[in-house]
Image (tube, rainbow, N blue to C red):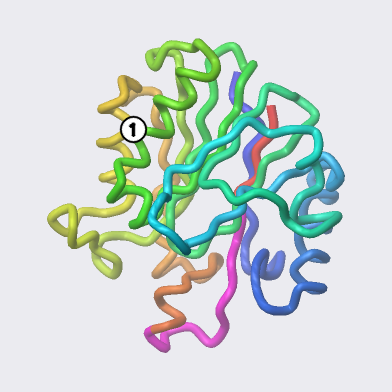
Amino acid sequence: MRPAILISTRQDGTMKGEDRVAVLHNRRQFLEMHGHNPSRSTIVRLNYEGSDYCRYQLVEDAQHGDGVTHEMGAISDALLTNNPEVSLFLPLADCVGVVLYDEAGEWLMVSHLGRHNLEQDGGRKSAEYFVSETGVPASRIKVYMTPAAGKINYPLFAFSNRSLHEVATEQLRAAGIERAHIEIDARDTTNDYSLYSHSEFLRGNRESDGRFMVVARL
């Protein structure tokens, strides 16, 4: 059973930024508008300090509301839950947000796969963590990938200039996930103006910076 998966757009406002009040308002409004309970929603909180970008954890009750109703909690690159009342969300700018779930609809994981994560084989490690924690074989895992920057404007130099989607797919396949079970939203954030693109903002091609987000719930 496919989980409920939503992608915000620029019209929904930025989901990460310096204006904390506006960001929390935008997150709460988007969640509530689509039937998600903010107090039962949890952010995948990223941090690029340090050297480990494959930090995964099972969501605990104390994390409910992280990033919406109160200050964010533990740092992670992916969150896993089997609670159908919990929504997981991840703000994005150009990287891939990966939603992994089992065919029975009993487990859900949201993982961040950007350049840093992929260079540490984060796609394979995300899938292997899912298998180890749930007991679900890789052959029964299905995947949805969010829009991401394409290889024309955002080539991955460490991977022969391939795209984020291509490398993420390769790593997930290496973990045993079937290609037919991988769904990719092929929109390119660098040329789709309905979405934010941090890399294009830095190049001076966008007037405003920001983040869209993916939300998923069993």
- Answer with left or right where residue 44 lies relative to residue 42: left
Q: Position of residue 82 (x, y in %)?
A: 68, 22
- Answer with left or right where residue 166 lies relative to residue 214: left
Q: Position of residue 97 (x, y in %)?
A: 49, 47
Residue at the spot of label 1: 124
Vertical comparison of 212 with 133: above or below: below
Name the chief secondary structure element in magenta: loop
Image quadrant in which the N terminus is located: top right
**Residue, x 62% and y 62% (percent of image)?**
9
Furthest residue in direction left, as rendered: 160
Residue 204 inside the magenta-drawn segment: yes
- Answer with left or right where residue 23 lies relative to residue 160: right
| Magenta stretch bounds | 203-213
Who is closer to the viewer here, 80 or 75? 75
Q: Amino acid at mark 1?
A: Arg
Q: Position of residue 58 (x, y in %)?
A: 63, 30
